[in-house]
Image: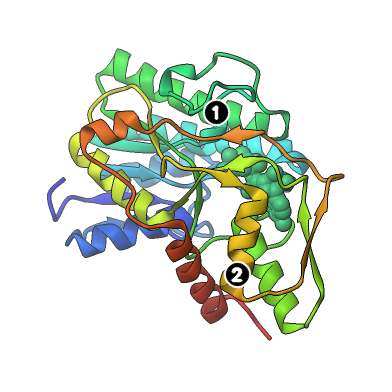
């Protein structure tokens, strides 16, 4: 990628897209093409093709997606499969039609089977049944991977598929119903502290294990792979370490300075028992995560208080 290459970031206002754009700006890239949801509905094939025909991007980061935590995935399965299949199909196909030099598609660690051997290596994809709470989303993401690989094989395109672990950071969704666990707990603990509540509800048993990566690390990895990786095989992006939801909750409570009790509601689903990516493929290329979990949560908490919280 040259500094003046035309770069389209699909989803530039979201957690991932905004982080990629910040990272590219720091590196001196300046020729961005962006469209808000209101300006371009990525589920409409003709609109997407018209946009690519007019703009002719050189490089594409496909970070537009319908995303959400365990409740959102479980409650809106039709929206998750429909939106993701259409958005990614339209962008991948248009990238082929209009000669995009390289495209990076963002998948997810939930593409791996529910009872996957841990840590999860790239070759474990499609080795077993998926976790039911997010199967429609995972199936859409797997279709995106297979589409990139098929286009590379048949048309000689250079479409990468990267699989990030659970992400967090600025511009995350802090809605208590639809968000992921980390932003949800930041908000719950902060509001409980402000209201002097004695307890906070944590969904599930607290025993599932998750790995978390700050989105600035993800953006750094995406740029690194855009420069250094040209294979069809998927590649995991993670921190290489996981912890239980209970441990995560204790860390967040400590950072937020909430001193009450944590109450686990086991009526709520746990989801995958464990989800840790094997990141040896990425490490062997020379990239490692840099932002520690406590440091990343503290930064995100500050961002939440300054940008989202309304007293
Ligand atoms: O982050 P999360 O919603 O998604 O939940 P997944 C992770 C774990 O945290 C689950 C528990 O065991 C939840 O039950 N948890 C505890 C909470 N308290 C809360 C809370 O207040 N809010 C939320 N949201 N969870 C998603 C997938 O799975 O991960 C997506 O549904 C995607 O497809 C994403 O892959 C990265 O890690 O379980």
State which quadrant residue 149 falls in: top left
Q: Position of residue 307 (x, y in %)?
A: 53, 77
Placement of the N terminus among the 4 image quadrants? top left
Q: In screen coordinates, is 51 left or right of 6?
A: right
Q: Is residue 81 above or below residue 210?
A: above
Q: Is residue 259 above or below residue 78?
A: below
State which quadrant residue 155 falls in: top left
Under tag 2, what secondary structure? helix
Label located before the other in sequence (1 or 2): 1
Q: Position of residue 92 (x, y in %)?
A: 40, 32
Under tag 1, what secondary structure? helix
Q: Is residue 295 above or below residue 138?
A: below
Mark carried by residue 254: 2
Q: Residue at x 19, y 40 (%)?
A: 227
Q: Position of residue 238 (x, y in %)?
A: 42, 41
Q: Residue at x 63, y 22 (%)?
A: 115
In this view, the residue in front, 229 or 206, is 206
Mark carried by residue 111: 1
Of badges 1 and 2, nearer the viewer stands 2
Q: Position of residue 225 (x, y in %)?
A: 26, 39
Q: Residue at x 32, y 50 (%)?
A: 8
């Amino acid at each position: 990628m040259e500094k003046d290459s035309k770069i389209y970031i699909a989803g530039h206002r979201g957690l991932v897209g905004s982080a990629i754009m910040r990272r590219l700006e720091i590196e001196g890239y300046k020729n961005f093409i962006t469209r808000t949801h209101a300006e371009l509905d990525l589920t409409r094939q003709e609109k997407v093709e018209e946009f690519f025909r007019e703009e002719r991007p050189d490089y594409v980061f496909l970070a537009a997606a319908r995303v959400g935590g365990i409740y959102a995935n479980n409650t809106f399965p039709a929206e998750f499969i429909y939106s993701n299949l259409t958005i990614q199909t339209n962008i991948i196909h248009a990238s082929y039609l209009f000669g995009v030099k390289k495209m990076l598609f963002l998948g997810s660690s939930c593409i791996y089977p529910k009872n996957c051997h841990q840590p999860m290596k790239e070759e474990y994809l499609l080795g077993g049944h998926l976790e039911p709470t997010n199967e429609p989303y995972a199936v859409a993401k797997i279709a995106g991977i297979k589409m990139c690989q098929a286009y590379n094989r048949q048309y000689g395109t250079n479409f990468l598929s990267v699989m990030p672990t659970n992400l967090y950071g600025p511009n995350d969704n802090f809605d208590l119903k639809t968000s992921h666990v980390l932003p949800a707990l930041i908000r719950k603990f902060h509001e409980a502290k402000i209201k002097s509540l004695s307890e906070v509800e944590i969904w599930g048993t607290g025993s599932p294990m998750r790995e978390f990566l700050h989105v600035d690390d993800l953006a750094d990895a995406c740029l690194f792979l855009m420069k250094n990786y040209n294979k069809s095989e998927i590649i995991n992006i993670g921190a290489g370490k996981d912890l239980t939801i209970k441990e995560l909750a204790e860390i967040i409570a400590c950072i937020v300075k909430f001193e009450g009790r944590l109450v686990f509601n086991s009526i709520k689903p746990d989801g995958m028992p464990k989800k840790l990516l094997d990141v040896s493929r990425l490490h062997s290329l020379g990239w490692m995560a840099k932002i520690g979990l406590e440091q990343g949560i503290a930064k995100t908490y500050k961002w939440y208080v300054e940008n989202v919280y309304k007293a």
